[in-house]
Image (cartoon, rainbow, N blue to C red):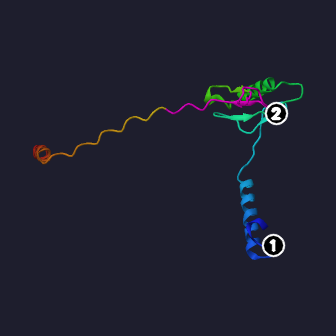
Amino acid sequence: PRGAGCQPQTARCSKLAGMAMLAISLSLATTPSVEIDCGSGMTVEAAGCGMDAQVMGVPDGTSWEDGCKRCNEALALKGVFDPCGGSGRCALPTDRFGRTTYGVWLKAHSAPSPPPSPPPLAPEEPLSRDALYLAAAALAATAATA
């Protein structure tokens, strides 16, 4: 990086270049790309509740909408949408003027939220000194008669 103010032969320059390469390597290693097959050579990068993924590999001669519908059906048969309503939906992206742009996306609702937790129990109030005395006296009387 000559623009960073280091000379190619200096230790500082090679250290900076090494650190940059390490950062790039780590970022590539930690961002896996998993393709999920949805039939006819089509794939999506993610499938399931909350998905918003472009359908890739729509076969020639097949409209984006038809390819997306087939992909949706294949994933629904695999059960990937069961927790979020049973099916996804296809969407064609549009630009800011409302014109359809390139590609088709398969989207699914998020999984339903779990039911709310019950309210916490009210803390017990400490017993007064009189209540403790009465409880001890009742316990002593019970023990004396037994």
Magenta-colored stretch includes residue 1 = no
Q: Amino acid at mark 1?
A: Pro
Region rendered in magenta: 92-114
3 lies left or right of 116: right
Query: Toward the viewer: 138 or 116?
Result: 116
Q: Give the image quarter of residue 29.
A: bottom right
Residue 146 seen:
no
Residue at 75%, 26% in the rendered image = 99
Residue at 43%, 35% in the rendered image = 117
Question: Mark 2 against mark 1, which lies toward the viewer?
Answer: 1
Badge 1 is on which residue?
8
Magenta-colored stretch includes residue 113 = yes
Which image quadrant: the N terminus? bottom right
Secondary structure at badge 2 equals loop
2 or 1: tag closer to the N-terminus: 1
Assess disc 1: are there few (<14), some (14-19) or many (≥20) residues with their C-alpha within 10 Å of its C-alpha. Answer: few
Residue 72, position as x, y percentages in the image:
74, 27
Query: Toward the viewer: 51 or 100?
Result: 100
Assess disc 2: are there few (<14), some (14-19) or many (≥20) residues with their C-alpha within 10 Å of its C-alpha. Answer: some
Q: CA distance from mark 2 to mark 1?
A: 47 Å
Q: Relative to 128, does residue 112 appear above or below in the rendering?
A: above
Q: Relative to 119, does residue 89 appear above or below in the rendering?
A: above
Residue 44, position as x, y percentages in the image:
76, 36
Residue 125 seen:
yes
Badge 2 is on which residue?
42
Magenta: main secondary structure:
loop
Residue 125, position as x, y percentages in the image:
23, 43
Q: Which mark is residue 23?
A: none
Q: Amino acid at mark 2?
A: Met
Which image quadrant: the C terminus? top left
Residue at 78%, 25% in the rendered image = 70
Q: Give the image quarter of residue 134.
A: top left
